[in-house]
Amino acid sequence: MTAVQAIAFGLVQGLGEFLPISSSAHLIVLPWAMGWEDPGLAFDVMLHMGTLAALLVYFAGDLGRLGLALLRSVVERRIGADPDRRLAWLVIVGSLPGGAIGFVLEKAAESALRSKVIVGVAIIAMGVVLFLADRYAPRRRKLGDLRWTDALLIGLAQAAAMVPGVSRSGSTITAGRLLGLDRDAAARFSFLLAVPITAGAGLLKVPKLVKAGGVDGMVILGTVVAGVSGFVAIGWLLRLVKTRSYLPFVVYRVIFGAAVLAAIFSGARPAY
């Protein structure tokens, strides 16, 4: 892998992980479109560690506060009226569906869902759903209004992101909007949900990758680029949704998906 390729993969991961455009779809399509060798799922894991670092840095204050609130609730064996305790447990509850389904279906998803046709269809379909949810759903509820059933439903939506093209942030933001959360609240809860599921995947996979000697200079470069670009993407999206809709991402998804499908059905690129 060259430095240019490592930087390109890092940018794709950092921007695609937090903007609702699907990092997994872009990581599959990029080498396919450019004629590069697929870096493999192990490299994808390290890129996710870069975006996890971006989350930990950007939300350091929030995560520290929620962590202390969670610890106090465990020690005292109650949640009470503390909004931080409640939000911490909501994040845990919302992480359970994605973690459980991902653990059971991970191997099948890795092998069966990487068809470029699936990617193209999924990225367009999810873009349409995001558009409808963002345009027509009520948007008055704040993060403090989140219910336990809401967290579970958003967590189930996160599990749907196992299909490349759906997008983890796209599916969770869409679910939040359908449940009436305003744009800022939907995005913030989506980002908080990314922390435990990404950290869990890292705990399982990164040690194996390191032991196998799979970390070299290009992997580190891509990971750093993913972290920096991810940090920028988080801040930009949270600022954007205060005054704008998700329409630009919907348009991008439709154009991207249509280009992938056109390349396949014209014979310019294979479906796998």
Image (cartoon, helix red, strand yellow):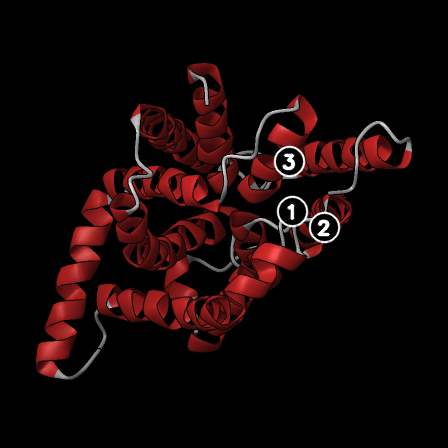
Earlier sequence position, callout 1 versus callout 2: 2
Q: How far apart are marks 1 and 3 (CA)?
A: 13 Å
Residue at 15% across / 75% down in the picture?
73
Circles 2 and 3 in contact, beta carbons < 8 Å:
no
**Which amino acid type corresponds to the residue marked 3 in the rendered image?**
Phe
Q: Mark 1 packing: few (<14 Cα in 10 Å), some, or many (20+)?
A: many
Which is in the foreground here, disc 1 or disc 3?
1
Q: Is mark 1 on a helix, strand or loop?
A: loop
Which residue occupies the extreme front position in the image?
212
**Which amino acid type corresponds to the residue marked 2 in the rendered image?**
Ala
User: In the rendered image, which residue does mark 1 sit on?
Assistant: 165
Picture disc at residue 268: none
User: In the rendered image, which residue does mark 3 sit on?
Assistant: 249
Q: Is mark 3 on a helix, strand or loop?
A: helix
Residue at 45% across / 69% down in the picture?
103
Q: Mark 2 packing: few (<14 Cα in 10 Å), some, or many (20+)?
A: many
| Residue 54 seen anywhere in this rendered image of the structure | yes
Picture disc at residue 122: 2
Earlier sequence position, callout 2 versus callout 3: 2
Q: Quadrant where the C terminus lies?
A: top right
Q: How far apart are marks 1 and 2 (CA)?
A: 5 Å
Report the front residue among 28 and 170.
Answer: 28
- Examine the image and state in which quarter residue 145 appears: bottom left
Report the front residue among 154 and 108.
Answer: 108
Relative placement, left or right, of 246 versus 40 is right
Q: In this view, does 185 lie above or below 19?
A: below
